[in-house]
Image (cartoon, coloured by chain):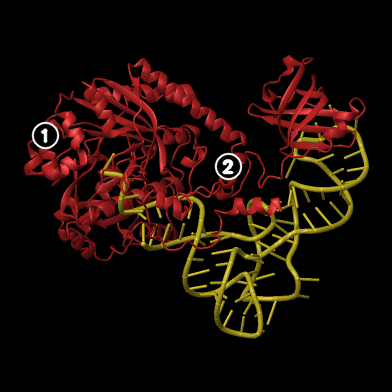
Chain colours: A red, B yellow
Amino acid sequence: MCGDLRAADIGQSVVVMGWVQTYRDLGGAVFIDLRDRTGLVQVVFDESSTKEAHGIADRVRGEWVIGVAGKVRSRGSNVNPKLPTGEIEIEADYIEVFNRAETPPFEISDDVDTSEDKRLAYRYLDLRRPSIQRTLLMRSRLNQVARRSLVEQGFTELETPFMVKYTPGGARNFVVPSRLNPGSFYALAESPQIYKQLFMIAGFDRYFQITKCFRDEDLRQDRQPEFTQIDLELSFVDMRDIHQVVERMVRSLFKETIDVTLPDPFPVMTYDEAMRRYGSDKPDLRFGLEHVVLTDLVKQHDGGGVPLFKQALAQGGIIKAMVVPGEQPLSRTEVDKLEVEAKGVGAAGLGRAKIAEDGTWTQSPFSKVIEDGLRVAINEATGARPQDTILFQFGPPKLVHTVMSHLRLHLGRKLGLIPEGAWKVLWVTDFPLFEYDEKSRTYVAAHHPFTSPRHEDVDRLTSDPGACRALAYDLVLNGNEIAGGSIRIHDPDVQAKVFDALSISAEEQQAKFGFLLEALSFGAPPHGGIAAGMDRLAMLIAGGQSLRDVIPFPKTQKGADPMSGAPTPIQEQQLADLFIRSIAPPSKESKDGTKEATKEATKEAT
RNA sequence: GGGGUCGUAGUUCAGUUGGUUAGAAUGCCGGCCUGUCACGCCGGAGGUCGCGAGUUCGAGUCUCGUCGGCCCCGCCA
């Protein structure tokens, strides 16, 4: 194929087919760079030797699909060092035009710099770009390596349904109407969770599947409504066994795609430590800027003369600080910009203090009121030195963590603290089993209601649910959650206590999970599992910025496909066939953007 | 649900305190050219300034609304 030809092929008669990348018509000679999946090769049509072929070639345009027959020959002194095929060219004596092409809306090249919605509207053209082709070929290899690793480790690949019973709670489901059962609906599976547990009960003690999952939640750079998981479940194992299986697979993935050696074993950190030091349950360990919790220290100083500190503590808040080193001192303006950034994620403001040579604080709202004792203590606790800037955040724990972890990532990027080519992998363990929901004033499952508490916390299920830790774990890579799982409950007594803590009544249990509970009563082995995000893994390994870079046909942030126009309204009759009536307000005419492809097509057809 | 940011030839962008016929590069079309590879040279076409109101003698520019893209918070058991 085009990109495979080398000097060793000189003299060979070849036939190549592909797309015209560029043409250079010099009059008596036409040069065409022909592209296929493997790369580019230069084809020459010489008027003096092939009058007929030359006559066709000089009318060829970009992205036309052609086939060429000719001889590989040396370029002599005209080598193009930029191309792998640059030492040779094809001296063509025959050309066939398979298809002409409209002028594409953007250039098919890795250098393209066009808007993402245009790329998605013409995704089939975007996918012609070599870099995306490389990414998808790499992703194909990831699938092979994952499968091989798991099969070698004794796993069986089994399928589970996409169309499943709707269960409330957790991620919102996409819903599928049942024509055969008027008024009833399936849900698209948000994960194979329950079914893989049923495989364990059935005795398939090591299951895996590379499968799509569907969640009707708001999109992000790293979240698509349909995405691919490598899903695992194992019987007769503990947490460490599961970690080892995953580590083996992930190490293979990195080794065999980008030749990166990940540590053995992966480091582990508890959820509490991650929140304390980084304000996040998926900390990016490639750089410092760790947080320091000052809550107790400030308590000891009874607020240290700072009214805002005292107020935050009185309301049950926490106080956190982060030191920005003086090697790259922050100007007043830069800190003001950081405050805007902080307010953007919900902060009321951003406390700051610049450390003077004598350790006093300048450029700080606290400098006039703070007592020397607390100031010295904070300098010491944070390790702040002259020229450094301390940033403060205080208030409700969740907000403080969100703001501070956002600032940490923002500064890490802005100050260039994130080393290129670094890979920092981490297990985060001991997540809380429950979270308290202020609205319903109940505990809700932090992971899912079948997650086992740590064995030593079982006694606290009734006495102090909020303090229970789960046998749940996430795998974090460079600040991205790439896998998450847990040991499941297989003891009916423990399961009952968990449902009690969640205030889920017996009737509710039956209605929501009856079939799983019944299955668990027929002899369930101890089991647990994990699911890895294939798209995120592929994104990280490919060095992409967005999940859209590694998914052939992704959705926009509003869940739309600019190419097909999906989602669209459907006919009244179709709704009627499904026993559904829409209460949506009438759709606005000619929405812009999504219909662009259609409009273009109409224009060109007329 | 909320915050930020962007929207001008096919594409990437410029467009002054609101002021003549909205520019550049590239791409596209036509012509010339036998060693180009960002080919070159000559000529040409190409615009609902996202959409809709408003202010104004006059709006790409100001105001309000709306649609869409992207990033984030909430949400994602």
Q: Position of residue A42 (x, y in %)?
A: 76, 28
Residue A504 in view here = yes
Q: Residue at (28%, 63%) from the top-left corner?
A: A366
Label 2: which secondary element:
helix
According to the image, label 1 marks what residue? A494
Task: Report, in whole angstroms, how far the alpha carbon at label 1 lies from the one at label 2.
Answer: 50 Å
Label 1: which secondary element:
helix
Q: Quadrant of residue A65?
A: top right
Relative placement, left or right, of A53 versus B21 is right
Name the foreground residue: A367 vs A449. Answer: A449
Q: Residue A123, labelled with which disc?
A: 2
Q: Chain of mark 2?
A: A
Label 1 Cα crowd, 10 Å radius (few <14 / some 14-19 / many 20+): some
How many badges with numbers are in the image? Answer: 2
Residue A385 in view here = no
Name the foreground residue: A402 vs A37. Answer: A37
Q: Residue at (13%, 41%) from the top-left corner?
A: A499
Q: Quadrant of residue A196?
A: top left
Q: Quadrant of the N terminus of chain A?
A: top right
Q: Position of residue A19 (x, y in %)?
A: 70, 33
Q: Amino acid at mark 1?
A: Val
Q: Quadrant of residue A202?
A: top left
Label 2 Cα crowd, 10 Å radius (few <14 / some 14-19 / many 20+): some
Q: Chain of mark 1?
A: A
> In the image, is residue B36 above or below residue A358?
above
Name the foreground residue: A1 vs A96. Answer: A96
Q: Amino acid at mark 2?
A: Arg
Q: In terms of sequence position, does the residue under pointer 1 or pointer 2 come before the other?
A: 2
